[in-house]
């Protein structure tokens, strides 16, 4: 049984590659999806495709319309969602994607450091499982195959 | 036609009373719901009802289980959701509630200051309408009755 | 049994008042919803609430974001949708609202002149009933109460 | 990841072949569906299968019943919908298909010329992304694979 | 707690009045809906509203389009469906309404004479409860209030 | 694009083989499902698996519980439903399966002889397409591939 | 805001009256539903309405068909479900009702003694809130109104 | 046609292997899913992945969060659910999984010994088919392929 896993969360560290490599090491038949990891491309894709916009508000809106379409397509193809929060940044996209997953009845694994227990308590309570490391998230998925 | 409006967002300012007073002034037949605004009560409701928990993690989880039930009941009764973001705090709950509203096909009005355009661009793009003030949010709802 | 009826369609003639008066004459317990009938207000509501926009594209988008929220709220409250097409104008909104009604499993009565049989044939085939006059549409609804 | 794309819109120009050729040039693993492009066949399929009808109204209804079944099957198999509007024709089918896609939660890319900004503003606001050329629509889809 | 009950089934006997009178006698707070019981009106309503049709096929189709809209509105308002089969007539409408109720997750009480056990066995197995008399059907509903 | 087609309807003639052979002749990539065609097996499968039942009522109920499970599994796998009515028999199962298909939003092709126009008018009006022969039903499906 | 609360669980103690009295004492605008509390009536309702059955298996099946219809109607009317497990009895009905509530997205409060922590751990994890007493369950609901 | 079958029920006997071997003997193209059958692993998986928990309550909750995610993924992939009850143990998980299957519209085969007729009567009434042995359950599935 092959499963698709959407990796929601910040794009400032290399955590997605870490997940993918560990999945290969564990020989798990997983396909991973996720947001655009090239931050600059993600921010300018609106103007790249739609042309120059009047100001930053519309530049951001144009980019996010395309990123949101991308997320919708990939989320709908996914069986499980992992949402990772780091200690920096607002990461509202991660919260939005995680909540969308829960509302669509897609199992959610939340990865967050101990320091974020309090601000993420409601999401943690709604998630299927909350862990602190990417390793733990993959162990949860590996357990499905045991 | 009476409408129920869920007021998602931070509980550190008095913005919900402002909304309610302005709705009365405009004679709009609205009923407002929202999260527990007594912050201390919201944080300790878990231990208040379930008893002492082993540590802060479980204290937070107990509280959020009850707050999440509350939100689920009230959100399901609502016709429209207003989600307000301020400049402070992580406000992940606001993002989660807003995303839940969108996924449940409930119309969403996002209220956020200009300074948050960039970090909230994806949510803004998915929201029905994005405004900067509570007044504008109410004008949008008032327009339904015109 | 009271029913809510959404009156989708062009706003250039007085057909909605005609519907309402005839419903009163027939003593039907109907509440009617519909789009903003003040055309100028409908077009400028975006800038009225959100402020000046960079150009006509964004002016139109701002207005339609608020009109779409309005339609979504009212359509969700409706039990039946009447969609009226006249001989003039593109009336794509009417087509969009009618299709939304069908996909949401809301019964649809299509009102269109004989001259539009060919271009509206697919919508007509999907509608519950297709008639040529507002009188006929109301007779269909009156029949529910017989 | 292979994706199915439904190409809603007018059948008077060769734009679907243009889309398909460009997808091949970009090596995108897409399968394209769309309405019957042989206009004459589309109009007479009702009588071809069901036999002569009493008049044009019923001839059109017979044809559209079969075309609507075709659209329903193909739309349900699709992951993304592109809806293209040209400057001519009423194109209500395109509006109906686009609205059905949105209501079914299928991502929608709207392609329309600058001249149609005003009449298509509500659909544009509801679409995930609005572009002016087929090239741009394909770039949006290509971005999913980047 | 008031409940709406749709009374699907043949319109050749007076069974619906029997149901209504017994509900009043039992003081059950029920509102009853059902198909048009005036058979002649039901058959000619299409031509009454839409005008003369080319032949019996289209006369029947016109009438059923209006009767189907009526059924859809009333079924969507109902909490429980009673479907009664008599020994005569094909009664395919009754079967269609009963199956629609089941698929929409509306509780179904099937009323059929012993002689129809075999031909109705699949519907009976899918129904919540199968009884032989209208009295029994009402006793089932009365039990909800005990 | 391969499609699954459920063939609802009477099992007293060889019409399903006719459909299958014609689909092969037309080289249509269709997989066909349908009810148990061995009538005797269908009637006794309950007692075959569950053992002797107290009387015919329970014998029929046992058989139909297993036939209903079979139908539910196969209907859920199907993209299109063809429902054929012949001139004999009550065929309530066919009506039930056809209505289930419509309510589940599965495209429905109704095949019925001219003599059944009146008793099947409501189902015909709700079906996507109504034809009189199996050949016509297959032509409708073949048209999807043109 | 009035709420409907379904009280799933054993019928051997008087806990439902306790809940109702405490709700009145707290002045909570709640309406309570629940299974038939007259155990003997619940077991014999099948034969009471449908007549004598061949043996206990069918007697039980007849009774449960009517009790299940009752539960389905009342559960669909409910906003919140409280499921109480005692130390005795299998109480599979309670587990079934609780799981149905969760799958239908109805908020669930689980009440169970400490001794049942282990066997009910999966249900507890899926419930919104787990408490040990009826008092606590009502406090959770009272909190919605604070 | 390949089908996925989820085997809900107790993990204290070897019944799942029996099912699998018999499916192979019958050459049925079935893939089987089910809960973690290593009881010890199932109970300690929470602490294995998440680390030591404060007490048994939280140890159980941690384990069940991971087991519930596993069940949700596998249940969503399944076409049919078999739920087996033995004479020992509370087996509330089995009841929960069976009810979830029914609410998700997945066909359910209940396997239970004669001694459990009374306590499982409501679930039996809601199940598609109730049998007493694993052999019978497989015969029901085999019948789909006949």
Image (cartoon, coloured by chain):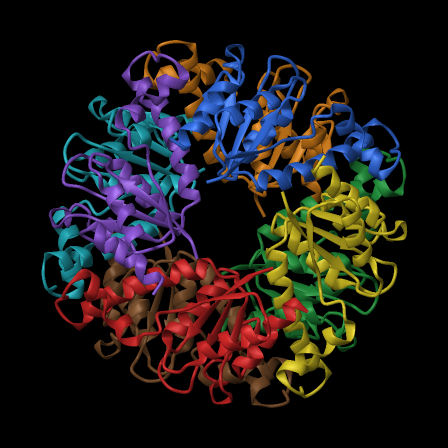
Chain colours: A blue, B orange, C green, D yellow, E brown, F red, G cyan, H purple
The answer to whether B33 is drawn above or below residue H19 in the figure is above
Which of the two residues, G146 or D45, is positioned nearer the viewer here?
A: D45
Question: In the drawing, does residue D53 fall left or right of residue E132?
Answer: right
Q: Quadrant of the N terminus of chain F?
A: bottom right
Percent position (x, y) of residue G106?
Answer: 41, 39
Percent position (x, y) of residue E28?
Answer: 29, 59
Query: What number of labels is visible?
Result: 0
The answer to whether D130 is drawn above or below residue E118 in the figure is above
Q: Quadrant of residue E110?
A: bottom left
Q: Quadrant of residue G127?
A: top left
State whether residue B17 appears in this view: no
Give the residue at x 64% y 89%.
Answer: E54
Question: In the drawing, does residue H2 fall left or right of residue E138?
Answer: right
Q: Quadrant of the C terminus of chain F?
A: bottom right
The answer to whether E75 is drawn above or below residue H34 in the figure is below
State whether residue C60 appears in this view: yes
Give the residue at x 28% y 29%.
Answer: H38
Which of the two residues, F19 or C46, is positioned nearer the viewer here?
A: F19
Which of the two residues, D89 or D143, is positioned nearer the viewer here?
A: D143
The answer to whether F114 is drawn above or below residue E111 in the figure is below
Percent position (x, y) of residue A88?
Answer: 64, 13
Percent position (x, y) of residue F63?
Answer: 25, 66
């Amino acid at each position: 049984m092959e499963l698709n896993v959407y990796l929601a969360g910040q794009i400032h560290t290399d955590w997605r590659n870490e997940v993918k490599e560990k999945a290969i090491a564990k020989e798990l038949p997983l396909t991973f999806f996720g947001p655009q990891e090239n931050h600059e491309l993600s921010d300018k894709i609106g103007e790249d495709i739609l042309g120059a916009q009047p100001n930053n508000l519309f530049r951001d809106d144009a980019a996010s319309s395309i990123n949101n379409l991308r997320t919708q397509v990939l989320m709908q193809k996914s069986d499980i969602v992992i949402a990772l929060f780091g200690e920096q940044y607002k990461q509202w996209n991660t919260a939005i994607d995680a909540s969308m997953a829960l509302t669509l009845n897609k199992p959610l694994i939340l990865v967050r450091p101990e320091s974020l227990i309090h601000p993420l308590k409601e999401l943690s309570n709604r998630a299927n499982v909350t862990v602190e490391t990417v390793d733990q998230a993959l162990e949860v998925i590996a357990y499905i195959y045991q």
